[in-house]
Amino acid sequence: MHALTRRWLTVGLVVVLLVGGVVPPRATALSAAEPVAVDGPAVDQVEAAVAAETAAGDRPESPDRQTANRSDRAGVRAGSADIAPITTRRHGDTAVARSVAATPASRDAAASDTAVAQTDGDEIRQTQTYARITEEPGRVAVRLTYEIPDRVVGLDTRVPDGATVTEADGFRRVNATAYEWDEETTRAVIRYRINPNRTVSKSGPEGADGRYVSVDAGEWALLTRSRTPTRWRYVGQDPVRFNRTVETAGPGAAGEELVYLGEVATFERTAHNQTIELVVPERTTMVSSPIAVLDSLTNASNALRIGDRDERVFVVAAPSTAVPWGVAGFQLGDSDMWIQSDRRLSSANNVWLHEYVHTRQSFTPTRETRWLTEGMATYYAAALTLEQDRIDFASFRSRLSLGTRSVYDDVALADPDSWTANANYNKGGLAAGQIDRRIRAETGRNRTFQNVARGLNGRQEPVTQAQLLAEVEAAGGAPARNDTVRYTETTAATPVWNQTTHQRLFGEIPARIGYSLPPVDQRDAYRAGGPYRPGAPVGGSEPIRLVTGETLVVDVVVENAGGAAGAYNASLAVNGTAVAAEQGQLAAGERVVVPLSHTFTDPGRYEVSVDGERVTVVVTDPGQATVTEVAVSSLTVRQGESVTVTATVANDGDVPAAATVVFTQNETAVAQHQVSLAPRTTTRVTQPVTLSRPGTVSLSAGNGRDAGPSVDVTVTPATAEPTRTPAPTTTVERTTNGRGDGFTVALALLAVAAAALLARRR
């Protein structure tokens, strides 16, 4: 089942859960064929509450993204987090508020208030700490802690509806759920208790006999984290970030959205730039071994080259027999999920892989493409299980054949009103498979449905039927598009292909091209181009900082994990718009680095992405370099001769800087030079100046705004005896490494001695 990103459920199911206090940022995953009812208030009541909250200004301007907006108060800005379900994926530090990966389970983290780390001046740190209450089964204790930096001048939060607050330190109560920071402490805490039990009513391929999706079973609990909408006001130009951590007090484990309380064993595997953490509770008996589950999931991670691969996936093997679960598996947020521990890997209805596929879907469907969410997960769960040799073709074909039953004779997938008996799973899974088969046939296996999924994941806006058809045509041409129209827009029967066809089109693993950004801490994989610091590494941390006029060069990684050669088209996007691309061919198993670049002309905060992976780039105007010293080649010259004026230009800032060095003679400009400097560097600029009049002349150099330092030079008449006086060599140039190329002390003394000896001989 998938995190329900559809807007028709966001107002209903998601807000129902919000009132219950457990809505995940990306809409709770219930993977249902029909709208799912979760125990709670009626939908119309919830919609009314949302409307009232919105009218009161209680939600940000853009609910799908955590944002920063100007406050009515001059000089004060506003930020918010956890306000509404997140319907788009977040990388990198791209918004004012962000949810970060949760900490691993901690036995002692919540045992004392000192467990919360101190914050810096640009980050609010929220920590949710969960604990069982042994003397009160069915209730879970939560400690909500905020570490608030000095730049924040106001903050308010909400606890879940129905929560019982037992203590508030640093907060004032506004109403039953709202609390306001008292602005007197840098650390504020609310302690409350919640009922974690949540039930669901559904049926279908992912359904189960019971109703629970979140529960406190007494000796253990598996629940979703509380929604705690937070808003703050702050001063200063740069946004104040929001960092959330979820942890447990005592035995347990926590992801970004799921929390398990109780004794656990944790298994972890890192591969293909992704870490999968499998949490196995003490009371769980697994049918498939933890190692086998990790093998299957990491294999799928490599096989699916469709973008949107999260850095970490958090998986809980939920005890199967202890609780009457309402679903076989539950995926929510970006990459958290639980699966009943008795689910087998050797099944065409592989729930482990079904839920994993959902973590790789970042597109938002529209009504006519809603079938894709479950249809794609159903198809790939069976196809990947077959590819892993855990089932035979007969089992695979039998699973897809469910979509040919007569109950679907009047079903058109693009019309949800026509769906019956979980058509989006069964007929949708078969349709996804047939589109894949058709694309392979039309391109000689050089392209697959993964090309379509990759294109959908790269879209910022909801995917319409027209956009789906365009992606299919781009991958497999007009024949594949025409078949997709028939499979989705009409009630025509969709056939299942036979084993001979499968061996011809699927037997050899086709080209499987994947694209990824290098890790941001790989400094030299992100380089600057332009006048200031060409070729200099700018990676290492996020955001990457540039100035206007600079070019970001990114070493995009392109890899063919398939069994045949294939074409690649690596594309770099800025704020969702492609700005650079490179094409080529890759042999099976080959991996190449493709540098792609973009020049930023305007200041701002940008999201640079490759195939769904994102990194944040902040662009500012360049700093102002200054002239720190001026020297001349001689302090005394004859009329009509020239002296060389040398200006030392420095950039003491942390960003590149520019300057127009203006050379003047007696405050009259005689020449100018444009200078560009990397951070913390200096350079020298020279200019010959002819002195045509006797007397004392003031020579100077400035940055165009300030006159800068000056040196006086004596100009003797042309008829006078030449008395050229070298300038003293007291200036030492400052460079990037702190050393200059001027005279050393020994060389300076040697030069003076030589001049004296020459004077005696004359």
Image (spheres, rainbow, N blue to C red):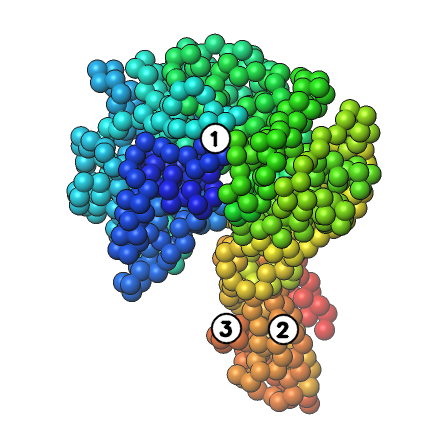
Other residues around mark 2 within 10 Å, as few (<14) / some (14–19) / many (≥20): few
Say which label, 1 or 3, has the lower sequence index.
Answer: 1
Q: Is residue 529 left or right of residue 3?
A: right
**Up-down relation of residue 122 to residue 278 (above or below):** below
Residue 708, numbered circle: 3
**Amino acid at circle 2:** His
Question: Can you tell which quarter of the image residue 676 is in?
Answer: bottom right
Classed neighbour count for the residue bearing mark 3: other residues with Cα under 10 Å, few (<14), some (14–19), many (≥20)? many
The picture places residue 274, in percent across and down from the top left corner, at: 58, 31
Taking the spot 17% from the left edge, 45% from the top edge, the residue there is 174
As measured in the structure, the alpha-carbon distance from the residue carrying label 1 to the one carrying label 3 is: 64 Å
User: Measured from the top left, where is residue 602 in percent x and y?
Assistant: 54, 64
- Residue under pointer 2: 673
- Residue 7 is at least partly visible in this image: yes
Tally the marks. Answer: 3
Say which label, 2 or 1, has the lower sequence index: 1
Select label 1 or label 3 by which is in front: 1
Q: Nearer the viewer, residue 697 or 346?
A: 346
